[in-house]
Amino acid sequence: MIFFNNKVMLQFCIAMLIFIISLAAAHEPFQEDKKILRSSIDLRDGPGVFHEWTGRLFEGTVIKLHETEEGWIRISTREYNGWIPDYPELFDGNESETDENDFEGIRHSIYSNFGDEEYDSENSGGFASPTQVAAAVRGFSRQYSIQRAGESQSGIELQSLSEIDPRVYRNFKRDRIGRWNRNRAQRRFAISADDVLLFDHKNESIGWAVAKRLASEGIIQNTEFQNYLSLLGFMITESSHRYDLQMHIYLMDKESISGYSTPAGVIFIAKGAVEFMQSEAELVYFIAHELAHIQFRHGIREVEEREVSIKRDEAFVELRQLLADEPGNEEYERVTGELSDWADQVFEYIVSERLNEYEYAADYWALVYMYRLGYDPGSALNLLRRIHLEEGGFQREIGTLEWKGPALENRIERMLQVFEDHPEFSEQGMINSEVYKNKKEVLR
């Protein structure tokens, strides 16, 4: 038989007490930290935008908060669990703070997000699968693209991009930026998600409608290069303000230096622009510039400030009701006509010259995103200078310049001022000229 003296027994009891207290504390947040989503958000099966998209949670959904990892937080509902970005404004209230009137407005908001298929908010648990979301977006966007561009296969859909294995992405990122992580990026150049608004999913149908219209000009289907664009997009998004935004990047069959972005997070890069660029760093800048337009909602704000967004929301709800009744009547045509007018305004903004202040802002934030990733910001300046020098003979050799906005010399001048204000941007970063040259070979 083994005998314990009083001192040993006391130490044992204290150790057990500490263990029990720590165990209880570890489980306490799961039991008590319930929140209500204040905005719809996409759910993923891991902490990162490169992980599989498993569905969408809508505002008003009661969630439990669990552990965090590099800006993401694991959550659970009664039926689902996964990861969402750790943005405080997503769940700034406790479950008890929402009354029945709030939920009535929430149901209305959920309904207005959906398209041809009716959404059963009572039985869904505030969740929609990727298939449901894609079906909702597809309805109006397909009809609009047919009206404006004719019956053509655009080759783009909300779920059309192939899934990227997270291990492939991690290897891709490690080959370029070593042990990069989000915390290190924040230390390099701090930015705040509070500087931009959360992604508005109500703009998704309009954004994809405009994207399909743009895509009717021709999309190059090349899986290898498409995956390359997607991997770069994940990296750039991770270094941006809203690191949960799912970008869809497509290569347009155009010989001009042109690029477009829509409110749905869709970015188009013309083949002529890809051919003209000389390094991966230049391509990163080009994508980051368009991403900044999306994140800061450039152009969309003007349309919303005209109170068109209110009519848009009402029209979508009305359209849902008409579809449930008898689509094709005069009222149905009137409502879809109003939504089409709104989409036309967005389209005209995208293909027209942008406001100077937006281009300057997009250039600035593109430099920030590049620096946070470890790419050479000077490559952005080199690209603009080469485009400016080639303007005279470019039309004869390749096509027309369409990366529209303020005169290039003004953008170059502003960028030089940014370098003067931020000497850290002059540090040598990654350029990857040979890597990019090899990647472009698959397009020939």
Image (tube, rainbow, N blue to C red):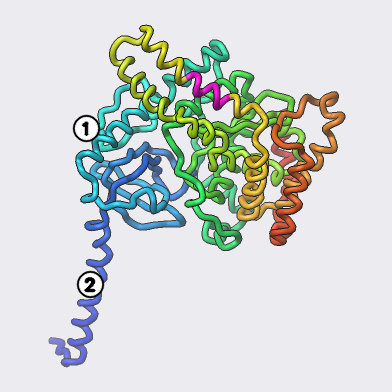
- Residue wearing tag 1: 122
Which is more foreground, mark 2 or mark 1?
1
Does label 2 or label 1 sit earlier along the sequence?
2
Kind of element beneath mark 2 = helix
At 46% from the left and 48% from the top, the residue drawn is 48
Q: Quadrant of residue 124?
A: top left
Q: Which residues are magenta?
A: 340-347
Q: Residues within 10 Å of mark 1 (few under 14, many from 20)?
A: few
- Residue 162 can be seen, yes or no: no
Q: How far apart are the alpha carbons under marks 2 and 1? A: 39 Å
Kind of residue at badge 2: Ile
Measured as percent of width and height from the top left, residue 226 is found at 60, 33
400 sits left or right of 110 in the view: right
Q: Which mark is residue 21?
A: 2
225 sits left or right of 66 in the view: right
* Figure quadrant of the N terminus: bottom left
Kind of element beneath mark 1 = helix
Question: Which is more toward the observer, 102 or 227?
Answer: 102
Q: Residues within 10 Å of mark 2 (few under 14, many from 20)?
A: few
Measured as percent of width and height from the top left, residue 128 is found at 33, 33
Query: From the viewer's perspective, is residue 11 above or below residue 428?
Result: below
- Residue 90 can be seen, yes or no: yes
**Most frequent secondary structure within the magenta stretch:** helix
